[in-house]
Amino acid sequence: MKRKLIIDCDPGQDDCINLFMALPHTDLYDILGITVVAGNVSLEKVSRNARMICEMSNRFDIPVYEGCDSPFDIPLVTAEEVHSDEGLEGIDVFEPEIKAQDKHAVDFIIDTLMAAESGEITLIPTGPLTNIASAIEKEPLIIDKISEI
């Protein structure tokens, strides 16, 4: 049985490499969606970067959901000095044809987990945990639904 994954990330250079490695079709897992959170750069830019990597990987079938644009109680601190202003030093960024989904990432996480059998979905966070924390705060019942993080 294929593992079902939700990738929660803040695509700067590091997460884009992670996505390039995860996105090729495989018999091992299905990516149900990619949720993005502000971190390395702003929410707008991480969303564009995730959608751009999906498009470059010819994965038009994986939805991208925009999530939280800042941490809970502190201002967002980004890392442009590491990842560049666009989050992807060294490549030409473009506005992808793939659009972000209308549903908020937190709601996608909650809805997907609540519709699944317990222990069926693995969350793979590679950035700030704000989307996942917000989902748990909004719907604590999802905790028992998560296979692993």
Image (cartoon, grey):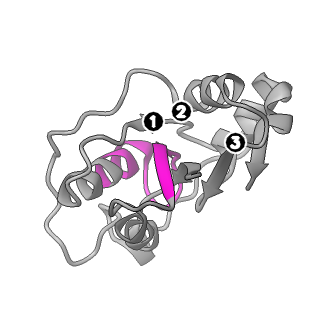
Residue 106 quadrant: top right
Q: Is residue 22 above or below residue 43?
A: below
| Position in image of residue 17 (x %, y %) | 39, 73
User: Pointers 2 and 1 in contact (CB under 8 A)?
Assistant: yes
Q: Quadrant of the C terminus?
A: bottom right
Dot 1 alpha-carbon crowd within 10 angstroms: few under 14, some 14 to 19, many 20 or more: many
Residue that mark 3 sits on: 120
| Position in image of residue 124 (x %, y %) | 62, 56
In this picture, residue 27 sits left or right of residue 148: left
Q: Label 1 amino acid?
A: Glu
Q: Label 2 amino acid?
A: Ala
Residue found at the very far front of the displayed protein: 1
In this picture, residue 137 sits left or right of residue 42: right
Residue 43 shown in magenta: yes
What's the mark number on residue 66?
Answer: 1
Dot 3 alpha-carbon crowd within 10 angstroms: few under 14, some 14 to 19, many 20 or more: some
Residue in view at x 13 percent, y 67 percent:
92
- The magenta-colored residue range is 29-49
CA gap between label 2 and label 3 equals: 19 Å
Residue that mark 2 sits on: 105
Residue 119 shown in magenta: no
Residue 18 quadrant: bottom left
Q: Nearer the viewer, residue 25 or 131?
A: 25
Q: Label 3 amino acid?
A: Glu
